[in-house]
Amino acid sequence: MKKITGTSKLYEQVLAQIESMILQGDFQKGDMLPSEKEIMDMTGVSRITVREALKKLGEAGVIETRKGKGSFVLMDRNDLIRDTESRDEYVKAFQHSTQVRCIIEPEVAKLAAMMATDDDIRLLEETLNNNSNDFHKVLVSIIRNPFINNLFAELQEIEEDKNLVNLIEPSEQKTIVPLIKNQHRKIFESIRDRKPEYAYFYTKEHQEFVAEIYEEYFTIFY
């Protein structure tokens, strides 16, 4: 590892160095990384920066930090290798998909708050309480528009392409899951309480949050 320079975020640079060393075979699956103090000395950054880098790597499933023992590599280099062309195509497609959803889904939620039947609300609440990944699918189905349903299915298929890297994506990371569930709950309560403007706002906020966390994820790992 080398001293950190440049203008990008410091923790991203530390993370990139560790990831590069795994790709080069310097660290292999099962190996223990240098201690926080050693990484600080090698890179010249603060402990907070090192911990942020290790946290991001841990959330993505690249390493596991065991209390009192250290951080251990969970992936081989082949788990992180990806075809550049396929990677870039996927990232662009995902960005386009989330852009469309940021435009459309707030309006869908607004309509759902006006159109939802009692059965719709019960199903949406059940989906929320069961931690199901179908929350958005059920939400879209409430307005009973087959064109919107088909579009949503196509967008979801694009976003769920997991053939490129063997990482834990943001929506499945343990620090992100509770935030997303809380956002879903706000959307649900707005629909349940027949508050279209609130449903629009909370859905817009949620979609922008998802776009932001994936943008950071792509910057770091892709």
Image (cartoon, rainbow, N blue to C red):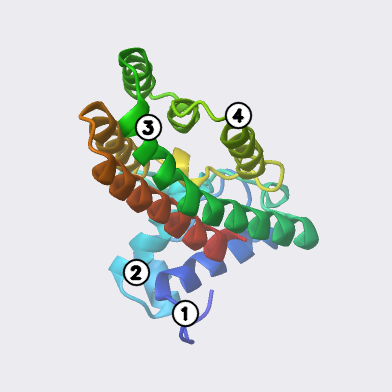
Look at the numbered disc 4 and give the secondary structure of its residue: helix
Please give the residue where the numbered disc 4 appears in the rendered image. 146
**x, y percent for residue 90:** 69, 54
In the rendered image, is residue 64 in sight? no
* In this view, the mark in front (4 or 1): 4
Give the CA distance from mark 3 to mark 4: 14 Å
Quarter occupied by residue 198:
top left
The residue identified by callout 3 is 112
Q: Residues within 10 Å of mark 3 (few under 14, many from 20)?
A: many
Is there a contact, CB below 8 Å, between mark 1 and mark 2?
no
- Answer above or below: position of 131 versus 30: above
Q: Residue at x 61, y 57 (%)?
A: 96
> Can you identify the residue that label 2 sits on?
49
Disc 4/disc 1 C-alpha distance (Å) = 44 Å
Labelled disc at residue 67: none
Which residue is painted at 63% across and 51% down in the image? 28
Residue 141 location (% of width, % of height): 49, 26
Residue denoted by label 1: 8
- Viewer-side label of 1, 3: 3
Inspect the image, locate mark 2, and give the three-letter code of the amino acid beneath it: Thr
**First along the sequence among labels 4 and 2:** 2
- Along the polypeptide, which appears first: circle 3 or circle 4? 3
User: Can you say whether 85 is above or below 70 in the image?
Assistant: below
Marks 4 and 1 in Cβ contact (< 8 Å): no
